[in-house]
């Protein structure tokens, strides 16, 4: 070893020690990690390897010599009677097998007793070692103290020897029993250890609430759990109540007749603690490997976050014989899953256009291995999300992948941001067709409004052919795929230009099927204005709004010429819908497409328009519920509208009358709650003066 090599090792060990201690403080004490777990593990292993090679260079503050960060100054300190150890990690099968070999090798060796005699090796026991596998819970380790079965004190792990007294917060965790079950009778003094975790559903709710209040979301459930547990001021009792506690060890007070760790878990359950149901005793190494693989396969389906399998020697006598190293027990190991979070670099940000026209910013990443899959893209969802996280090209980011969900950027490591980066903004024109993009007021999504945009053509075609729209029988997804792929459909209106021979050129298309499709298309040309408006797929225009527009304007031309203000003035439309409609018809591409559809024969009968101000029911809003005996629902609607009234589908304070037939639904209850007048059929007919 040269002086130069030792000097390099000295500098690198010092650098790694400082960096790992900083990240540990950010992670454990400030709940705002800057790097992924996988990145931390890599740095930690590099330090371990250097210290093994240069043991004289080990620093007193090295994270390899301690279990966790010291307790913070916000809570009183509590000294653990026995250390709360961390666990060594196995990152793959080879390392887990090496752990098993070390167990057997250690148990077969002879050891001197304090009196100088030799302790015989436990050969028989070593040959029959069994393991118990438990999910590695991704939370915050705590220790609970019970006196005569009553909870008296609780603390965090801290640095393993001294933790923080968080008793008052732990009392709010509903999953922690304040009084233990009496059968079996708990010992006078009992110390239980386990993990505080936050279920995934509660984690998502918490982050949604934080975003609504302008707060930074937690990076993962573990940090959310630790952050909730270590609240000092403005304690949120609901956050604490949502936490769960799973017990996994009795540190003090273990009955003498308990021989295995499996029996320990059973006893904890009988005392009233929740334990992990995903636990199994493995009699062989192969069984342990199979259990780990099965747990990994189920990981994405579990209601909590786990990041590996903890394997412990099941026999307590062997645990005692194996003993502990300075920071970890010899008899246990955490066999880690492939990381679900990783750190990488954003090389570009591109806008993808989805089948509904939504523009989604996607981060193009330097490829990285996450959860067993190589990831090179991560969704940024929308412009608001990009701005909230401030993701820029060149940034170092933490990404995560849960189950089969598209990878997402968790956060930006702004300390590593290069100079000269610029904020990203979605393009003003669709990257696929060039149409001007639209973002409606109150919506988070930016969209391409072009009916014929290639990115959304298939979706628009299927929507137009649907039963609620033009109802083109036989024009399904597989056929649309073929027609678009062959170039026969390049725009929406091309459907009505298709000929018999166009269908015959497709795969598995016979004369009869082609003839049926031609007839279905011809039939679809004869439609109603309501169905035609639905077929256009205008944002926020469903059957109810389409019918309202059709009856108000009577034909398409006056609707296309109407201003946003004129449309907004229609009762039941509203500003967001009005903006969507006005923007759609203002687009010249859409105007041309509508005109071509009409040129190709799509038509509808005009509707006689009676505006509200001209009828005896001018300005009155009706809601129909239940079955009418003398009128159909459609006839009643037409008569009300002919008299200048309006028919709505929902009851509100603005409703003037609710018409009640036989077997009315919840609309009658709503009317009674709001004090809206009700009419029976006879009263309606009288009001309409049609007797």
Image: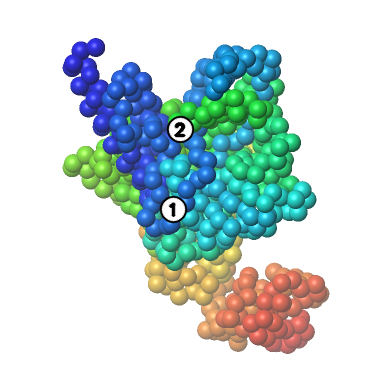
Q: Nearer the viewer, residue 14 or 617?
A: 14
- The x and y percentages for residue 257 are 74, 36
Question: How busy is the neighbourhood of tag 2: few (under 14 within 10 Å), some, or many (20 plus)?
Answer: many
Residue drawn at (47%, 70%), measured in percent from left and top?
574
Q: Nearer the viewer, residue 516 or 160?
A: 160
Q: Nearer the viewer, residue 673 or 33?
A: 33
Q: Is residue 590 above or below residue 130?
A: below
Q: Is residue 434 above or below residue 329?
A: below
Disc nearer the start of the sequence (1/2): 1
- The x and y percentages for residue 414 are 28, 44
Mark 2 element type:
loop
In this image, 433 relative to 646: left or right? left
Q: Nearer the viewer, residue 376 or 659?
A: 376
Q: Quadrant of residue 64?
A: top left
Residue drawn at (64%, 78%), measured in percent from left and top?
622
Colour mapping used in the image: rainbow
Q: Which residue is mark 2?
A: 327
Question: How busy is the neighbourhood of tag 1: few (under 14 within 10 Å), some, or many (20 plus)?
Answer: some
Mark 1 element type:
strand
Residue drawn at (59%, 41%), measured in percent from left and top?
251
In the rendered structure, are the residues bearing label 1 and label 2 in contact, judged by CB atoms less than 8 Å apart?
Answer: no
Whether residue 513 can be seen here: no
- The x and y percentages for residue 44 are 37, 30
Q: Is residue 546 above or below residue 469?
A: below
Q: Quadrant of the C terminus?
A: bottom right
Badge count: 2
Q: Give the label on residue 77, or none.
A: 1
Distance in Å between CA atoms under marks 1 and 2 = 20 Å
Q: Give the label on residue 561, or none.
A: none
Whether residue 269 can be seen here: yes
């Amino acid at each position: 070893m040269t002086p130069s090599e030792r000097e390099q090792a000295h500098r690198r060990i010092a650098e790694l020690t400082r960096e790992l201690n900083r990240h540990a403080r950010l992670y454990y004490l400030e709940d705002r990690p800057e790097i992924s777990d996988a990145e931390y593990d890599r740095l930690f292993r590099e330090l371990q390897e250097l210290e093994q090679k240069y043991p004289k260079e080990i620093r007193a503050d090295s994270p390899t010599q301690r279990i966790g960060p010291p307790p913070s100054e916000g809570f009183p300190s509590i000294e653990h009677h026995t250390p709360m150890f961390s666990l060594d990690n196995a990152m793959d099968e080879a390392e887990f097998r090496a752990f098993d070999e070390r167990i057997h090798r250690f148990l077969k060796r002879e050891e001197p007793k304090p009196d100088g005699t030799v302790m015989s090796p436990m050969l028989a026991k070593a040959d029959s070692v069994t393991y118990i596998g438990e999910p590695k819970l991704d939370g915050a380790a705590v220790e609970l103290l019970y006196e005569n079965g009553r909870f008296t004190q609780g603390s965090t792990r801290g640095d393993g020897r001294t933790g923080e007294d968080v008793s008052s917060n732990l009392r709010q965790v509903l999953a922690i029993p304040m009084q233990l079950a009496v059968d079996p009778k708990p010992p006078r003094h009992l110390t239980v250890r386990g993990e505080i975790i936050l279920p995934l559903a509660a984690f998502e709710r918490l982050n949604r609430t934080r975003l609504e209040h302008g707060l930074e979301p937690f990076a993962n459930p573990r940090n959310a759990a630790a952050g909730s547990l270590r609240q000092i001021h403005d304690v949120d009792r609901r956050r604490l109540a949502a936490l769960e506690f799973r017990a996994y060890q009795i540190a003090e007070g273990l009955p003498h007749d308990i021989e295995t760790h499996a029996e320990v878990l059973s006893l904890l359950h009988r005392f009233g603690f929740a334990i992990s149901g995903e636990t199994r005793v493995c009699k062989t190494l192969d069984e342990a490997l199979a259990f780990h693989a099965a747990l990994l396969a189920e990981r994405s389906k579990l209601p909590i976050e786990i990041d590996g399998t903890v394997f412990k020697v099941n026999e307590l006598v062997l645990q005692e014989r194996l003993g502990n190293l300075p920071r970890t027990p010899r008899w246990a190991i955490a066999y880690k899953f492939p990381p679900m979070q990783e750190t990488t670099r954003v090389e570009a940000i591109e806008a993808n256009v989805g089948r509904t026209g939504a523009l989604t910013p996607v981060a193009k990443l330097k490829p990285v291995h996450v959860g067993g899959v190589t990831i090179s893209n991560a969704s940024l969802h929308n412009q608001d999300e990009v701005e909230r996280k401030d993701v820029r090209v060149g940034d170092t980011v933490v990404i995560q992948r849960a189950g089969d969900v598209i990878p997402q950027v968790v956060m930006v490591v702004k300390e590593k941001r290069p100079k000269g980066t610029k904020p990203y903004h979605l393009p003003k024109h669709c990257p696929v067709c060039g149409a001007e993009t639209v973002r409606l007021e109150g919506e988070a999504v930016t969209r391409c409004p072009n009916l014929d945009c290639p990115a959304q053509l298939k979706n628009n075609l299927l929507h137009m052919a649907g039963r609620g729209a033009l109802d083109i029988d036989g024009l399904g997804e597989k056929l649309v795929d073929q027609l678009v792929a062959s170039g026969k459909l390049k725009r929406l209106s091309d459907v009505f230009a298709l000929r018999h021979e166009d269908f015959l050129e497709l795969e598995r298309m016979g004369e009869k099927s082609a003839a049926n499709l031609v007839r279905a298309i011809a039939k679809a040309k004869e439609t109603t204005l309501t169905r035609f408006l639905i077929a256009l797929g205008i944002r926020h225009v469903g059957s109810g709004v389409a019918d309202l527009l059709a009856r108000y304007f009577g034909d398409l031309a006056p609707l296309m010429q109407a201003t946003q203000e004129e449309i907004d003035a229609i009762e039941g439309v509203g500003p967001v819908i009005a903006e969507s409609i006005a923007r759609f018809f203002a687009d010249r591409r859409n105007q041309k497409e509508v005109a071509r559809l009409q040129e190709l024969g799509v038509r509808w009968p005009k509707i006689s328009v009676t505006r509200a101000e001209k009828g005896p029911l001018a300005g009155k809003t009706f809601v129909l519920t239940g079955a009418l005996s003398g009128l159909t629902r459609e006839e009643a609607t037409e008569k009300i509208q002919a008299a200048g009234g309006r028919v709505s589908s929902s009851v509100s304070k603005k409703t003037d009358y609710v018409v009640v037939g036989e077997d009315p639904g919840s609309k009658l209850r709503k009317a009674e709650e709001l004090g809206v007048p009700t009419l029976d059929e006879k009263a309606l007919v009288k009001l309409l003066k049609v007797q």
